[in-house]
Image (cartoon, rainbow, N blue to C red):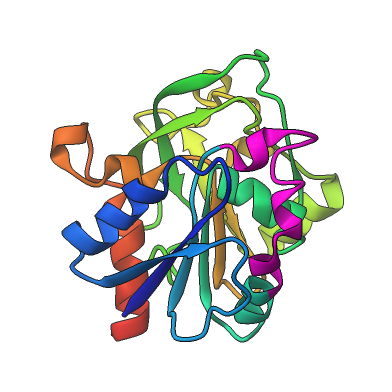
């Protein structure tokens, strides 16, 4: 299996993703510069976290115009796997590969800490090694991380089982204090209607080794490998 990690000006989690894929999973992986226009030969594309184009104008708003995004859109349209993490999720939203938008955190401050997220759907290529209701401990690091969508979109996400992760307590409950950024309906991650494009604000690559405090995030990458290799 071969992964691509896209690098935008301002990406800062690209090497973390590369390390997880190559050193922990033992899979092939290449960096792909954002000006490239061809993603042939890859099985899964990762849009990493960071501050693409300095987050000027609006998070992900400039990166959506990078040449690579048209190729990624076509790749996703053919069923290719795409994971957008934090800023990568924001780029997927701006590119209309996923519905909704990101707003400032409810406290208007940058938040960097471990949170708990609950698996809502384990039938996707990114969660097939998880159990429904399983709680993953993963960190967040963002200021524009409050997911928003209108009621119609939220209703559609629920009906089509596109809400993949929700922020929760250690017990899997949904008290308001477990929603760190004020995301609508506690949403931490969603997928597209076909299930092959995932966006999530938490950083699974930062929770893939016990030395980092959690290995739970590794399940997402390992699930993608299982989906492709069987």
- Give the residues drawn in magenta, as a range: 51-70
Position in image of residue 159 (x %, y %): 70, 63
Q: Residue at the left extreme?
A: 211
- State the residue in front, 13 or 37: 37
Q: Is residue 106 left or right of residue 215?
A: right
Q: Quadrant of residue 86?
A: top right
From the viewer's perspective, is residue 93 above or below residue 96?
above
Count of labels in the image: 0
Residue 61, visible in the rendered structure: yes
Q: Residue at x 29, y 84 (%)?
A: 229
- State the residue in front, 4 or 212: 4
Q: Quadrant of residue 65?
A: bottom right
From the viewer's perspective, is residue 107 above or below residue 178?
above
Position in image of residue 67 (x %, y %): 69, 67
Q: Quadrant of the N terminus?
A: bottom left
Position in image of residue 79 (x %, y %): 57, 83
Residue 124, visible in the rendered structure: no
* In magenta segment, residue 88: no
- State the residue in front, 54 or 164: 54
Q: Quadrant of residue 75?
A: bottom right
Q: Residue at x 80, y 35 (%)?
A: 57
Position in image of residue 95 (x %, y %): 75, 59
Q: Residue at x 62, y 86 (%)?
A: 78
Q: Is residue 4 left or right of residue 102?
A: left
From the viewer's perspective, is residue 85 above or below residue 40?
above
- State the residue in front, 29 or 92: 29
Q: Residue at x 76, y 49 (%)?
A: 100
Q: Quadrant of the C terminus?
A: bottom left
Q: Is residue 155 left or right of residue 26?
A: right
Q: Is residue 91 left or right of residue 167?
A: right
């Amino acid at each position: 299996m071969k992964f691509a990690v896209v690098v935008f000006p301002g990406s800062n989690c690209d090497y973390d993703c590369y390390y997880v894929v190559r050193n922990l999973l033992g899979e092939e992986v290449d960096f792909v510069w954002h000006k490239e226009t061809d993603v042939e030969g890859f099985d899964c594309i990762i849009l990493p976290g960071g501050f693409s184009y300095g987050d000027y104008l609006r998070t992900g708003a400039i990166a959506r115009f990078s040449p690579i995004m048209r190729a990624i859109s076509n790749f996703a349209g053919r069923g290719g796997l795409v994971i957008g993490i934090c800023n990568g999720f924001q780029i997927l939203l701006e590119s209309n590969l996923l519905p909704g938008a990101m707003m400032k955190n409810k406290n208007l401050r940058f938040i960097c800490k471990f949170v708990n997220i609950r698996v809502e759907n384990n039938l996707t290529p990114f969660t097939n090694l998880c159990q429904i209701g399983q709680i993953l401990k993963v960190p967040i690091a963002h200021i524009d991380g409050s997911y928003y969508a209108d009621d119609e979109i939220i209703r559609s996400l629920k009906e089509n089982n596109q809400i993949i992760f929700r922020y929760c307590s250690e017990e899997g409950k949904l008290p308001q204090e477990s929603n760190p950024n004020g995301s609508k309906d506690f949403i931490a991650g969603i997928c597209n209607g076909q299930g092959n494009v995932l966006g999530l604000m938490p950083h699974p690559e930062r929770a893939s080794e016990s030395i980092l405090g959690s290995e739970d995030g590794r399940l997402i990458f390992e699930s993608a490998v299982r989906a492709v290799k069987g």
